[in-house]
């Protein structure tokens, strides 16, 4: 998606790449292997600025992944006369203390990104207080697994019969959690010292 949006430039130097990462970030701190950054409310490596599979270039994330997803959805719905369609713009990310990457939904359109169980009962009748399912990132992880990270050259994945609730208007902030309320807040506060 970023390539079609022209969000790419020649790799000039490591210093220039670091400048780009900082410009693309809301927060950036250098770690042993990468830059730990926050971009668009997502903790990620190097603000998504990527050199892999880029042929001596640097690829940026799309300017507005939600709008890109909506544009693709509109085009496909019109061209193929599809009623229920969701589109996800994905990238890969690392999880704390876990090896390997998983998918992340940078933006999406056409479905609710969160399934909320709060107030409902579990199988033993206990009322759920905080449980929500991150539908968008779960689907993104499935897609990234199928598309691959190396030389697979699979730029998209089709997911069918997913248990989603379709809708036309998307709330970009439905997945956002204020860092002060995040389960990882003690790590942010103690080790990263973010100012919220």
Image (tube, helix red, strand yellow):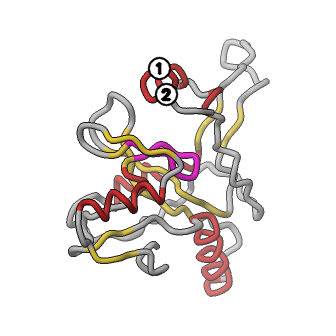
- 83 falls in the magenta region: no
Residue drawn 64% across and 42% down? 176
List x then y, in percent, for residue 50: 32, 62
Specify few, some or many for label 2: CA neighbours under 10 Å numbering under 14, 14-19, or 20 or more.
few
Residue drawn 34% across and 46% down? 35
Q: Which residue is mark 1?
A: 190
Along the line of sight, the residue nearer the viewer: 14 or 9: 14
Q: Which residue is mark 2?
A: 193
The stretch of residues the image draws in magenta is 36-44
* Above or below: residue 96 compared with residue 27: above
* Above or below: residue 148 compared with residue 126: below
Residue drawn 47% across and 59% down? 23
Task: Kindly report the distance in space between the C-alpha atoms of the residues bearing marks 2 and 1.
Answer: 6 Å
Task: Identify the mark at residue 28; answer none if there is no mark.
Answer: none
Quarter occupied by the C terminus: top right
Q: Quadrant of residue 155?
A: bottom left
Query: Helix, strand or loop at disc 2?
Result: loop
* Left or right side of 165 for 189: left
Main secondary structure along the magenta-highlighted residues: strand
List x then y, in percent, for residue 28: 43, 45
Along the line of sight, the residue nearer the viewer: 185 or 74: 185
């Amino acid at each position: 998606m970023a390539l079609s949006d022209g969000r790419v430039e020649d790799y000039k130097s490591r210093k220039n790449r670091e400048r780009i990462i900082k410009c693309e970030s809301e927060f950036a701190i250098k770690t042993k292997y990468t830059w730990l950054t926050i971009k668009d409310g997502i903790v990620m490596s190097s603000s998504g600025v990527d050199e892999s599979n880029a042929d001596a270039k640097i690829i940026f994330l799309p300017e507005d992944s939600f709008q890109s997803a909506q544009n693709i959805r509109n085009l496909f719905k019109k061209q193929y006369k599809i009623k229920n369609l969701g589109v996800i713009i994905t990238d890969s990310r690392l999880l704390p203390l876990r090896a390997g990457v998983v998918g992340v939904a940078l933006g999406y359109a056409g479905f609710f990104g969160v399934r909320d169980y709060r107030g409902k009962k579990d199988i033993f009748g206990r009322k759920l207080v905080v449980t929500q399912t991150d539908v968008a990132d779960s689907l993104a992880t499935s897609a990234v697994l199928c598309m691959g990270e190396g030389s697979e050259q699979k730029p998209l994945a089709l997911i069918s019969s997913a248990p989603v609730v379709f809708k036309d208007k998307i709330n970009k902030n439905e997945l956002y959690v204020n860092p002060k309320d995040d389960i990882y807040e003690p790590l942010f506060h103690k080790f990263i010292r973010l100012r919220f």
